[in-house]
Image (tube, helix red, strand yellow):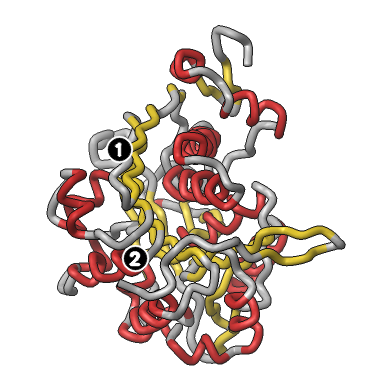
Amino acid sequence: MVADRESRPLRSARTNGRTMLSAVCVGETMAMLTPVQAVPLHLATELHCGIGGAESNVAMGLAAMGLDTHWVSRVGHDGFGTRILDELQAHGVGVSGVEVDPERPTGLYVKVPAQESDPDGGSSVLYYRQGSAASAMGRPLLSNPAVSSLLENAALIHLSGITAALSPECLSLLEALMTEPRNGRIVSFDVNWREALWAGQDRSVLQRLANLADVVLVGKDEAEHAFGTTDEAELRRLMPDPQVLVIKNEAISAISLDRSGTREEVPALSVAVVEPVGAGDSFAAGYLSGMLFGLGQKASLRRGHVAAACTLTVHGDRGPLPSAGELAAILDSSDDDWAAIHVEEGHFNTRTGA
């Protein structure tokens, strides 16, 4: 168990004369190419260029929720890297802790949409990330003055299991971040299971890393692959040290299990799903922001569900949040009113008109 795990006052950053909680998300973001038309890749004549990365998705979500948020990573000295930096900055995420590699390229993936001729086939993804700039992240990154300053002042450091699988250097970086004295910081770890990344690798690394975190997030479907079980008691036994373990049970509920044995379960909202991409990252941003703002587990889980619902009802990795007043009303609703909420096209409709 890592020393200095006890809860302490959260750190904050002062921006424009106001004190804001600061969060740092560390991980790879890649350029994403997708056929403009829903056609097989070999028939595509146009590809849409976007970006994709679990940790940067969480960073954009945290920034939208009022946190002073920064993304730490590496990109190539190329147009894809520039696009990633520009888009993150446009969403209010700081990029002063990003290194630009003059030799290694920015990672790339191609998202191939599902075909009408094979509706059960689903979409597929082709990764071109081996040897990427981000895969060279290692302990030397922590010697970068900009990075060390951001980490020193962070209330939250958010990591994921994706980074651990990219390279031995990336794994070493996570180990360093997760074993340093907390000094009031919270370290969160989203398992983010990716089958292709762990092929031929020792997945027991994920259990060891997760047990070093203060907050662990894992999908119930991911837990079977990463830890060999979906049983709550067994998962908590495998990871006894984190302050809280959050299990995302897809469209059913989210469950938090804290170290004292307290269990909280909040049912998911009814949602007219447009696209599931990015919902898990939005949930993480909602839940973690709730914790940082001092909310209890029930309110934090609800905040995660709201953020996920906003993303589920749009195309793309993020959906706009409700207004502050509407969000407060949703979070404060009774259990019956919460169960009556239906989210469609970003609108939260209930029997009470919330």
Label tally: 2
Q: Residue at x 59, y 83 (%)?
A: 148
- Mark 1 nearby-residue class (10 Å; few <14, some 14–19, many ≥20): some
Q: Nearer the viewer, residue 29 or 176?
A: 176
Picture layout, residue 342 above or below residue 53: above
Give amino acid for label 2. Gly
The dot on residue 249 is 1
Q: In this view, which residue lies farthest toward the right? A: 17
- Tell whether 110 sits left or right of 157: left
- Tell whether 130 sits left or right of 343: left
Give amino acid for label 1. Asn
> Which residue was labeled with disc 2?
161
Q: Residue at x 67, y 26 (%)?
A: 326
Q: Is residue 350 visible?
A: yes
Q: Nearer the viewer, residue 183 or 232?
A: 183
Q: Nearer the viewer, residue 6 or 109?
A: 6
- Tell whether 296 sits left or right of 327: left
